[in-house]
Amino acid sequence: MAFPAGFSWGAASAAYQIEGGAAEGGRTPTIWDTFSHTPGHTCGGATGDLACDSYHRWNEDLDLLAQAGIPNYRFGIGWTRIFPTLDETPNPAGLAYYDAVVDGCLARGITPWITLYHWDLPQYLEQRGGWRSPETAKALGRMAGVVAKHFKGRVKHYFTINEPQCAAGLGYGNGVHAPGLKLSEEQLFLCVRNLVLAHGYAARAIRDADPEAEIGYVSTGKLCYPETEHKADVEAARKASFAIVSNSENSWWFNHNLYLDPVVLGAWPAECAGTVLAPLIDAIPAEELALAHEVPDCIGINVYNGHEVRAGKNGPELVPRYAGYPRTALKWPVTPGVMDYGLLYLQQRYQLPLYVSENGQSCNDRIFLDGQVHDPDRIDFLHRYLTALEKGIARGSGVKGYFHWSLTDNYEWASGYEDHFGLIYVDYRTMRRIPKDSYAWYRQVIATNGACL
């Protein structure tokens, strides 16, 4: 097998998860600083104060990217490095840090892809309502404009928001992530609205600052794939992928269409009819939807697992997972089929280029007696998922690139440092980087454009 010519291979990271330097360069606290320093919120009380120390070790990390032959790097902008205070005066030290990273990428032949919002909301905005306030959406637009103007000619790819589903649902719904709130459904949906609106403001600001830039929007959520390729199962899995329900398997906020339909199609999902969201949607002013409807040039999809579905007597039904079903160290199920039909369904609905902006698995990685980090389970996972991805592309899924999550092990949010997703192991005692077996394996995949699979 081989991927299409020009396929974009990459690796990804996020600012708070790797940078550290929490009080350096003029940076001020975010909701994750506050949340992680509050006892009981993270595993072992872990914070991102140091993370992977990429604030100081970015040069080493970019060298490792280049040595792996990884031509694209998706990384985040720390909002409070750019705007440390409410007056939104750009911070020269923050811009200088990202200048170094961007220029370091370009000098090594690596294309930078910037994510503008990856969950690290300034604490000063949270104190004024956070994502419950439309003013936060406008503030993201202003930050996006400053960044796009500053990097015009050097950065050509932007993602406005990463996983609004998790920013809303985990942060303001069940309180598992920062800022750790458990709001009513009405207040939670207000956060959803403002995150969707924020994309509109940010995309418009980027286009005003740099009309040549490509703009994406990163989504995650429930995806399904059919038990068989019989037409009834294929249609059942498609319908289940976009159903908006709240039960033991799903929450109404964890889906793609609630966030993508307004942005791409200019309408809230028809699947909301008859749900608790219907009256809330009916109350949204038309002008708000018009502001949010800023069609991106591409869609990033963060995909880790999905649901196998078949046609039942009363509609789509989940195929039960057998005892001992394969799972990652985080206990997420291993379901490569989602990379095939799951992404195809998104392409058919939105008809935009897709990028797998995150995919990978957590492993119980360790340094072996030979001083190396061997991760055959990760290699097996990636082999299965990439093989399925190629099948989906052949069906017409429109996937143009793949970014492994993540480049290095990192601070995994509420899980702290317990989970390892990286191609590169980080020994947090010394910050020493050790490329894993999967690093060399991925290098070969990229070098052959997948023909080695």
Image: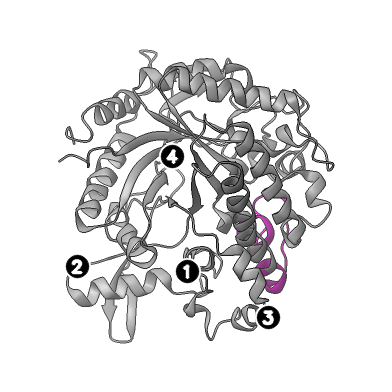
Disc 3 marks which amino acid?
A: Ala
Coordinates of residue 252 in the picture (x, y in percent) = 54, 70
* Residue named by callout 3: 283
As drawn, 42 above or below 96: below
Disc 1 marks which amino acid?
A: Leu
Of pointers 1 and 3, the one earlier in the residue sequence: 1
Q: How far apart are marks 4 and 1 (CA)?
A: 34 Å
Residue at figure coordinates x 64%, y 55% from the top left: 201
As drawn, 67 above or below 284: above
**Range shown magenta:** 169-189
Q: Do the residues labelled 4 and 1 touch (CB within 8 Å)?
A: no
Mark 3 neighbour density, 10 Å: few (under 14) some (14–19) many (20 or more): few
Q: Which disc number belongs to residue 362?
A: 4
Of pointers 3 and 4, the one earlier in the residue sequence: 3
Q: Which of marks 2 and 3 is in front?
A: 3
61 inside magenta stretch = no
Mark 1 neighbour density, 10 Å: few (under 14) some (14–19) many (20 or more): some
Kindly indicate the quadrant of the structure image that contains residue 350: bottom left
Q: How far apart are marks 4 and 2 (CA)?
A: 28 Å
* Residue named by callout 1: 265
Q: Can residue 367 be seen in this view?
A: no
Kindly indicate the quadrant of the structure image that contains residue 150: top right
Disc 4, SS: loop
Disc 2 marks which amino acid?
A: Thr
Q: In this view, does 392 lie to the left or right of 426?
A: left
Which quarter of the image is occupied by the N terminus?
top left
